Amino acid sequence: DGGITQSPKYLFRKEGQNVTLSCEQNLNHDAMYWYRQDPGQGLRLIYYSQIVNDFQKGDIAEGYSVSREKKESFPLTVTSAQKNPTAFYLCASSMTEQETQYFGPGTRLLVL
Amino acid sequence: SQQGEEDPQALSIQEGENATMNCSYKTSINNLQWYRQNSGRGLVHLILIRSNEREKHSGRLRVTLDTSKKSSSLLITASRAADTASYFCATREFGNEKLTFGTGTRLTIIP
């Protein structure tokens, strides 16, 4: 099956801990995105990547980091510098930045 | 920053009725897209309308775009219980690689 997967579905973070959210796609898409969604709100862009080994900050990049070493993978690390990490995180991909985006099922991050 | 603002924030209708949601935006756009999100899930793309288009249909969905008023509407005809979800508009500005999402309309279809 072609698609975009995220893992884990739920993730718990302790104070001062870095955690990494996985995002994998087998759609052969060039562009990948990370969004944060808070309750009752829309999506806010954290980081995006249009090509391997290149990525740009979105609107709320502080406290987050990403890498794009492979076309299929775009992991997001939530660092200890992110003071309010509790949210629903969505990964998406598209053929190019101009096209529609395909979303993964999301990861819910909770703070212990 | 939020580009698109949906109206209403929440809408409840009886099954079989039509549902209309509106989206307003602030700047010139290349295209506008509508997405659906079931509770706790990822978003699913519904329809894309380009700035030079005024209306588009897909099954029971009808989208209009009025660039002079910077607004779009999504009409779902003959609603079904399975249409219960949140609906988001997203805009892409010219020369911008990013999509900007609105805050969404939560639609509830009452059986």
Image (tube, grey):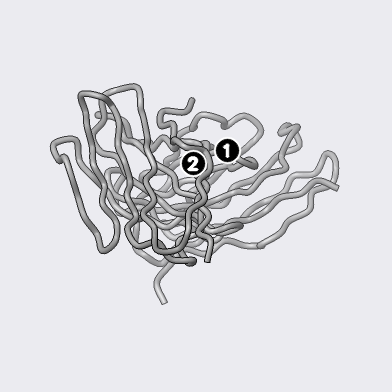
Residue wearing tag 1: A41
Residue wearing tag 2: B104
Pick the residue in front: B5 or A6: B5
Which residue is rendered at x = 57% and y = 38% of the image? A41
* Real-space CA distance between mark 1 and mark 2, rounded to the nearest whole angstrom: 7 Å
Give the amino acid at mark 2. Gly
Give the amino acid at mark 1. Gln
Which residue is rendered at x = 56% and y = 43% of the image? A66
Label 2 residue SS: loop
Q: Residue B35, labelled with which disc?
A: none
Q: Chain of mark 2?
A: B
Which residue is rendered at x = 31% and y = 31% of the image? B96
**Quadrant of residue A86 within the rendered picture:** top right
Tell me whether the residue at label 1 lies in contact with that at label 2, contact meaning CB atoms closer than 8 angstroms: yes
**A109 relative position to B69: left or right:** right
Q: Is residue A87 above or below residue B84?
A: above
Instruction: State whether residue B46 appears in this view.
Output: yes
